[in-house]
Image (tube, helix red, strand yellow):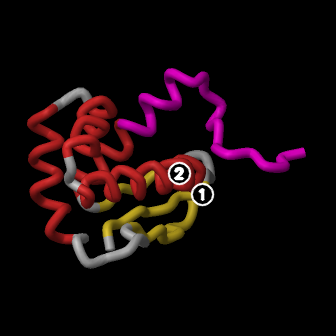
Amino acid sequence: MYHKVSKIKLNRRQGHRKALLKNLVRSFLDAGQICSTRAKISACRPFAEKVITLIKNGDLASIRKLVSIFNDREYVKKVSDKLASMYKDRNGGYTRVIKAGVRRGDGAPISIIQLV
């Protein structure tokens, strides 16, 4: 039974899963939207919301946390400059998930995640 399961495991070990989510969120913040399987998008959404909240806070502790997540100071600075002004008046709900049908090759359900 799946009572009180806090995250989606995606049939990967912890290190691979963390790397996958970091790469998905990084691509998502760069492009503004990405298309992937519904399970990956569902796992990516809470992490993306937390990252955007940290960007929006903009204090020293938040910046250090983001640098520890992405391991790239220039990227954090670039993204925080772009997104902090965009979401300064918004209290959550930074992303939108749209179901986009099924993938042609294997029939996997596909979703799109967008910045609102």
| Whole-percent x, y for residue 25 in the image | 35, 46
Side of 8 relative to 40 (left or right): right
Q: What kind of residue is marked 1?
A: Pro
* Residue located beneath label 2 in the image: 37
Q: In the rendered structure, which segment of residues is drawn in magenta?
A: 1-22
What is the C-alpha distance between the residues marked 2 and 1?
A: 6 Å
Q: Residue at x 60, y 57 (%)?
A: 109
| Whole-percent x, y for residue 16 in the image | 50, 24
Q: Residue at x 59, y 50 (%)?
A: 39
- 48 or 33, which lies in front? 48
Find the residue positioned furthest to the front. 60
- Residue density around tag 1, few if under 14, some if 14–19, many if 20 or more, within 10 Å: some
Q: For numbered disc 1, what is the local secondary structure?
A: strand
- 65 or 37, which lies in front? 65
Question: In the rendering, which numbered label is found on residue 109?
Answer: 1
Within the image, what quadrant is residue 20 found in?
top left
Looking at the image, residue 2 lies above or below residue 98: above
Q: What kind of residue is marked 2?
A: Thr
| Whole-percent x, y for residue 98 in the image | 48, 71
Find the residue positioned furthest to the bottom. 89
